[in-house]
Image (cartoon, rainbow, N blue to C red):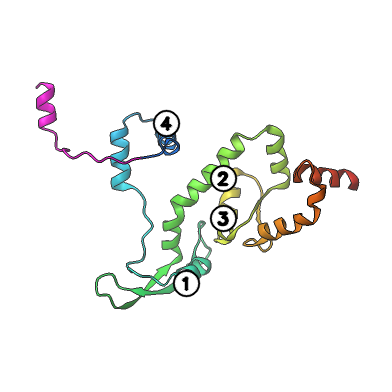
Amino acid sequence: MNGGEKVANRKRKFVLRVPVTPEERALIQQKMAQLGTKNFSAYARKMLIDGYIVPMLGTASPDYSGLIRALITIGCVYPRPQELSMLVKGRDAKTGLPNEVTISSTEMLDAFKRPARQIVDEVLAVLEHSSPELVADIAQTGIVLTGGGSLLYGFDKLISERTEIACSIADDADSCVANGCGRSLQWISSMQEGTINLARRKLMKEQ
């Protein structure tokens, strides 16, 4: 069978084109290298067919405030010691009528499993490319999580388990960074060489 006959007899006759940025292309190549494959067509086809999506619980117009409450109440990226469930209200995509859906913490864990793993992989990549001195400091003092996302149950446990470094959640995690930036303005005149050197000078005075 010659090449022309091979092309003619292929089942896959449709070609999909997806524009990407140079950064996205580099990331795709990096992911392919991690999987040990050079066949982009096979990789892309597999990801497009089996790729992960976050389901919207069967509602076309969900109550996002309810979803946020569900995230805080039963959301998790690490198995909870006890199964939890919660009602989420929204509009049914098929009937257009109001509807209620019961979701469980296990379903939330399944939904966040892959995104959480990607976040942890990035943390590991940062540690891998950091200087030995910085990694030693982090290993000694631990990792502190900030931001509202860190309040999702189990993020500290997941990162600590994967990195083998102690991990904790900052007090007032969802606004501590903004508060810290605001307080730093009080010493802005002393920040001639940046906040890091300011912290070092303060530490030297205490010693």
Considering only order in the chain, which callout, 4 or 1, is on the residue closer to the N terminus? 4
Kindly check if marks 3 and 2 are in contact, taking CB atoms under 8 A apart as contact: no
**Residue under circle 1?**
65
When asked about the image quadrant of residue 42, the answer is top left
Looking at the image, which is closer to me, 83 or 133? 133
**Residue where numbered disc 2 is placed:** 162
* Label drawn at residue 18: none
Q: Is residue 205 magenta?
A: no
Q: Report the mark closest to the observer, 3 or 2.
A: 3
Residue range corresponding to the magenta coloring: 1-19
Q: Amino acid at mark 4?
A: Ala
Q: Residue 164 is drawn in which quadrant? A: top right
Tell me the quarter of the image containing the C terminus: top right
Q: Position of residue 135 (x, y in %)?
A: 68, 38
Left or right: 59 in relation to 94: right
Question: Where is 195 relative to 37, above or below?
Answer: below
Does the residue at mark 4 contact the one at mark 2 (Cβ under 8 Å)?
no
